[in-house]
């Protein structure tokens, strides 16, 4: 079983910064892709940023130049540095990992429980 543990959400004023972190643990061989998604009530979950073993970071247009995703050398932890936060960034942020339980085996997707980010004055 794979667990994703998120941390770093909270309340911040517009223009402020937050840093989200997500660590994967459990039985797996590799995690080719990890990323952050977000969701607000009544809307579909959307990709915010992801990072893979083969390509550089990918961001949704609305966060480019404000958010930065990074990954540790063990490739089990990702961080999302969020700067110049706006009220429209308010959402529940979910960590997602595409996991291979065995090398070159099939990929399974796992989700964290979510962490609330609220941007408000």
Image (spheres, rainbow, N blue to C red):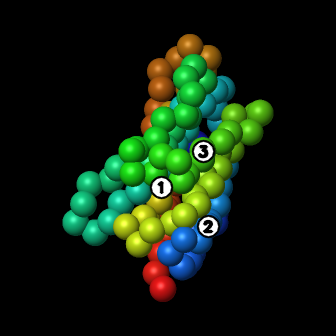
Marks 2 and 1, Cα distance to the nearest angstrom? 18 Å
Residue 80 appears in view: yes
Which tag, 3 or 2, sits closer to the chain's start? 2
Q: Residue at x 45, y 68 (%)?
A: 86
Taking the image as shown, residue 17 lies to the left or right of residue 59, namely right
Q: Nearer the viewer, residue 42 or 70?
A: 70
113 lies above or below 107: below
Q: Which residue is mark 2?
A: 17
- The x and y percentages for residue 121 are 48, 85
On screen, residue 43 versus residue 33, left or right, reads left
Residue farthest along the left direction in this orientation: 42
Q: Which residue: 37% across, 67% down?
A: 88
Label 1: which residue?
94
Residue 43: image location, x then y, percent: 24, 60
**Picture quarter containing residue 8?**
bottom right
Taking depth in this image into account, of 118 and 110 the one nearest to the observer is: 118
């Amino acid at each position: 079983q794979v667990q994703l543990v998120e941390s770093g959400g909270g309340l911040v004023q517009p223009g402020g910064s937050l840093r989200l972190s997500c660590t994967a643990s459990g039985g797996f061989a590799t995690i080719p892709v990890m990323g952050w998604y977000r969701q607000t009530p009544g809307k579909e979950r959307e990709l915010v940023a992801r990072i893979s073993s083969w390509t550089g970071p990918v961001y949704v247009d609305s966060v480019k130049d404000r958010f930065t995703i990074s990954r540790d050398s063990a490739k089990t932890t990702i961080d999302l540095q969020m700067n110049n936060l706006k009220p429209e960034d308010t959402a529940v942020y979910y960590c997602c990992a595409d996991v291979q339980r065995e090398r070159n085996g099939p990929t399974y997707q796992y989700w964290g429980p979510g962490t609330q980010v609220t941007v408000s004055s």
